[in-house]
Amino acid sequence: MKVYPYRRLTGNVSWRVDSAQLKAEGEPWENLESKYLSTVERVVALGPDEDRPDWTLARLRLSAGLPAKALDPSGPWQHVKIVAVLTERATNTRTAVEFSAVSEDGRERTAELYVYRGDLLDRASLTVHVVATVDGVPGRVIATSDAEWFVDVIEAVPSLARELDVKMVRFGSGASRLQRFKESPWLVDTTGRFPAVRVNTDFEGLGDLMGADGGTGPEKTVRELLLAQMCSEVWTAVFHSAVGDLEVEDDGTPVFPHGWQGEVLREMLPDMYPDRAPEQALREVHAARTGSSATGWGELQSRIHFAASRRAGVPRTLSTTIRDLERLTQGDDA
């Protein structure tokens, strides 16, 4: 648990993206259709789509609400403000906008955030902070909303899930970086904007097996087990990539990364540390990586392996495979 040297605001700071507008070069503003803005997924999808213009500037309309105690004149906070911050690690973009009060008591507030298409490469996160003067010190962050939205300039459909990029490639005659892995059945690449899997079609029989639809009982059984194993390796690789370069606050507390890296960690950490909150689990992982934990990096690998196998469905697939093989054996004996 992080300790602050000043009073923090407790209670929910609710906020949302109400609507969005897009503007193409030399054209008027156009309202973004509701299908591109999901309040359930908390995603604004601004990727290429034939139904909307090739936009250069977006305008997001935001609304937020403060707990009554935040504005109590006898309370510890003065000059309370709400600030929305848009952040994207791919381009190191950071844009902030302050909310304005729209109700007499100052609790209900709105803001307009302008997003330039050229500033974003992938998916940016949008968070809301409450800032105030505390004990005479201005600019103290007294609360951060749990709700996080995403502004996605790649996808046209608002979804937190991202499809894994799987491609069939000949390693032996492909790119030079693949040729040295020509004996490997597949590789997981986490250097791009999204994790990708490259399946080696030079590996005898692998391309036909992976690309087959249906097939005989044994072929289907082997293919499903192979896919589960591949998915387990993917989860392991993307986890290591996600924790490989964590940002750390001044007090040493690690911060969840944005984009798919943060999504991977939030998916796997509950399996690795079921008795801890995600923030506490992330601190455990960071401590193991940096050598400041008694458990150490070696013990952490078992947790990663367990979580990756579970995410990939390896136990379930293996159980099904064993049952299928037993049935096949019984059939041969008959």
Image: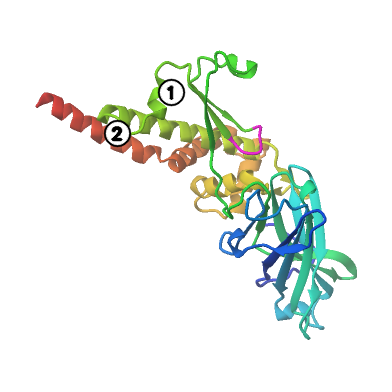
Location of residue 307 in the rendering, given as x and y in whole percent from the top left corner: 48, 41
Contact? badges 2 and 1 (CB < 8 Å): no
Is residue 244 in view? yes
* Extreme-right residue of the structure: 136
* On screen, residue 303 above or below 50: above
**Pointer 2 residue:** 321
Question: Tag count in the figure?
Answer: 2
**In this rendering, would 223 be left or right of 34?**
left
Residue 67 in percent (x, y) is at 70, 77
- Picture coordinates of residue 71, whole percent (x, y): 78, 79
Residue drawn at x 40%, y 41% as measured from the top left: 313
Q: What kind of element bears circle 2? A: helix
Name the residue at 49% across, 51% down: 274
Q: Which residues are magenta?
A: 191-195
Q: Which residue is mark 1?
A: 207
| Image position, residue 217 (x, y; %) | 26, 30
Q: Give the quarter of the figure containing the C terminus.
A: top left
